[in-house]
Amino acid sequence: MTNGVGDQMVNDVVNNSNSLSVFDFDGTLTKRDSFVPFLRFAFGNRVFARRLVRLVVPALKCIGRRVTRDELKEVLIHTFLTGIEAKWVEQKAIEFCQKYWTRLMRPSGLIAVASQVNSGAIVTICSASPAMVLKPFADRLGIRLIGTNLETQDGMLTGRISGHNCRCAQKVARLEAEYGPLASYHLRAWGDTRGDYEMLAAAQEPYWRHFHNGGGKRHSPIAKIKGIRK
């Protein structure tokens, strides 16, 4: 099956409490990005469009490699979430999850998550998207969550990231900060972008675009990813 639902490595998992199963969120468990659609949902089309204009120049600089993806993410967060009440964002995240769950989530990904939970593994999302936005999704899946943390002061978002954007090497660092050395676990990891390479490289069982139809497996960079560990 092209989407991996019946894949032996997913469904016939070892019942092992020392297994750690880690899923990227956007594009892996979902069919598309979630954070920008969340901002559009939360602020409404008019405000979203007006503020999005401010990102045109930074986005062009990112395309020209004069601004990094992390820096562009910081501009996005600053533009939309400076001086916003954290509880308001949390409530909007709940509403967003309820409204868009079926449209966003990949059925094959949901099956895989449930399979890992039933196996007795520790199961977590590890995503660059704000943890505050993804918490309702993790709660509904019944799994743990590591995401980019947003800075708050007196209940208000400052528009800044607390710590680092949770992508690339930071995914491994955050996982080890939460669970200890990854070498202590049988690690399974699912990802779909360059931001997941280091996490996949640390895994005994890396899955690249496992829930995508066809193309991801034909052009898998797993051999290249494994080279990161050498």
Image (tube, helix red, strand yellow):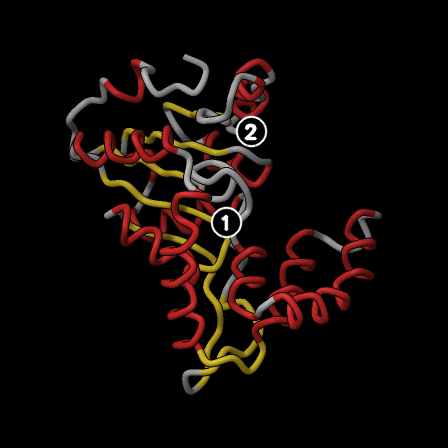
Separation of residues labelled 1 and 2 (CA atoms): 14 Å
SS type, badge 1: helix
Q: How many numbered badges does the structure rendering display?
A: 2
Residue in the picture at 27% in, 41% down: 123
Q: Is residue 71 left or right of residue 90?
A: right
The x and y percentages for residue 125 are 37, 45
Q: Nearer the viewer, mark 1 or mark 2?
A: 1
The x and y percentages for residue 66 are 82, 53
- Which residue type carries mark 1? Gln
Q: Nearer the viewer, residue 44 or 170?
A: 44
Circle 1 residues within 10 Å: few <14, some 14–19, many ≥20: many
The x and y percentages for residue 131 are 42, 59
Q: What residue did someone put label 2 on? A: 228
Q: Does label 1 or label 2 sit earlier along the sequence?
A: 1
Compared with 189, 96 (above or below) is below
Q: Are marks 1 and 2 in contact (CB under 8 Å)?
A: no
Circle 2 residues within 10 Å: few <14, some 14–19, many ≥20: few
Q: Nearer the viewer, residue 109 or 150?
A: 109
Residue in the picture at 23% in, 22% down: 13
Compared with 136, 220 (above or below) is above
Compared with 31, 50 (above or below) is below
The x and y percentages for residue 64 are 84, 48
Q: What residue did someone put label 1 on? A: 170
Compared with 69, 225 (above or below) is above
Residue in the picture at 47% in, 59% down: 130
- Which residue type carries mark 2? Ile
